[in-house]
Amino acid sequence: MHRMTKELPTAGDQRRSQLLRGVLDLCLLALIAERPRYGYEFIEALTESGLELVGEGSIYPLLARMERAGLVEPFRAPSSSGGAPRKYYRLSEAGRAELERGRAVWQGFTAQADRILTRTIHGGTTP
Amino acid sequence: MHRMTKELPTAGDQRRSQLLRGVLDLCLLALIAERPRYGYEFIEALTESGLELVGEGSIYPLLARMERAGLVEPFRAPSSSGGAPRKYYRLSEAGRAELERGRAVWQGFTAQADRILTRTIHGGTTP
DNA sequence: CGTCACTATCTTGTGGCGCAAGATAGTGGC
DNA sequence: GCCACTATCTTGCGCCACAAGATAGTGACG
């Protein structure tokens, strides 16, 4: 049985989805560095912001991976607004180190890519 | 004689490899926008630059995909330095449009990510 | 009590794509 | 013929964002 493509993603959406790779984990680490957070928090905040950035299917597996890698440490706490108990994450030492290392890689990479992408900004239809 | 330095990928390399997704095609489009290019050109230039950025296994399939998508148009030309004939690519109208669209998505995305990543540059060991 | 709505986490399957490694050719020097 | 260099194309693997759905805990309402 075939899947019915419910809503084919736009080209921009698909690109953004690819761009998230390699930096989404750093974003979560940075936000957790501010204060402990739980998964649903990210989804709610991002959904309300109008930035339909990331869904549960991206966040939870990523958090699990980071936990497995020892970058974050989980602890349980009851929900303050009624509901299932939350799983908060705080940053580990390794997580903080990875965040700083990743930030450097990210900034070096974007600088390089920007240099290539802005070399021919004129893009006129007049050759 | 082949390259013996078979260094297994570091964490930074793996991150960079993920970061390329979503922007590598734009880089190629931007470089082709300057002047027509062929695949081997990218690899040679990048290898000599010390930036071991991308290999054949990334470039050629990507070029084929972009051709299939109508973003670039190929034409054959004999090698000027002895060797197999080259397959040059020039930008199509759709390619130029996609390049501009992609640049906008890229800059919007990186601005957003940068804002998140630079929010907590300092380290706070206070929970 | 049952049902519903909301909060919250976890799991499964799919698809895209960077990449290593190897196959295939064309050219020219020995 | 053989080899080295230039150049392209192909195969298989692994990572990961994402959609969709399963699982639970809580409280309100009738």
Image (spheres, coloured by chain):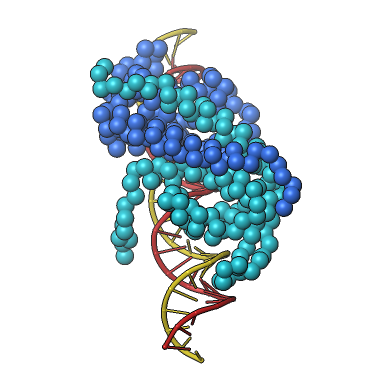
Chain colours: A cyan, B blue, C yellow, D red
**Relative depth, front residue between B9 and A48:** A48
Question: How many numbered marks does the figure carry?
Answer: 0
Estimate the x, y position of residue B113 in percent, counting from the top left: 52, 40
Quadrant of the image for the C terminus of chain A?
Answer: top left
Residue C9, compared with residue B75, is above or below; it is below
Q: Position of residue A91 (x, y in %)?
A: 68, 50
C30 vs B51: above or below: above
Q: Residue at x 44, y 49 (%)?
A: A51
Does residue C19 appear left or right of residue A89 in this picture? left
Q: Quadrant of the N terminus of chain A?
A: bottom left
Judge by depth and name the residue closer to the eye, A10 or B40. A10
* Residue at 72% from the left image edge and 52% from the top image edge: B127
Q: From the viewer's perspective, is residue A64 above or below residue B33?
A: below
Q: As rendered, which of B42 and B124 lies closer to the eye?
A: B124
From what the image shows, is residue B1 above or below residue C28?
Answer: below
Residue drawn at point x = 54 percent, y = 20 percent: B49
Residue A86 screen position, x and y as percent: 61, 65
* Residue A94 or residue A68, whichever sits in front: A94
Residue A19 seen by the camera: yes
The x and y percentages for residue A58 are 50, 54
Visible residue check, residue B18: no
User: Which image quadrant for residue B61?
Assistant: top left
Task: Tell me which residue sits at (50%, 44%) in the image.
Answer: A21
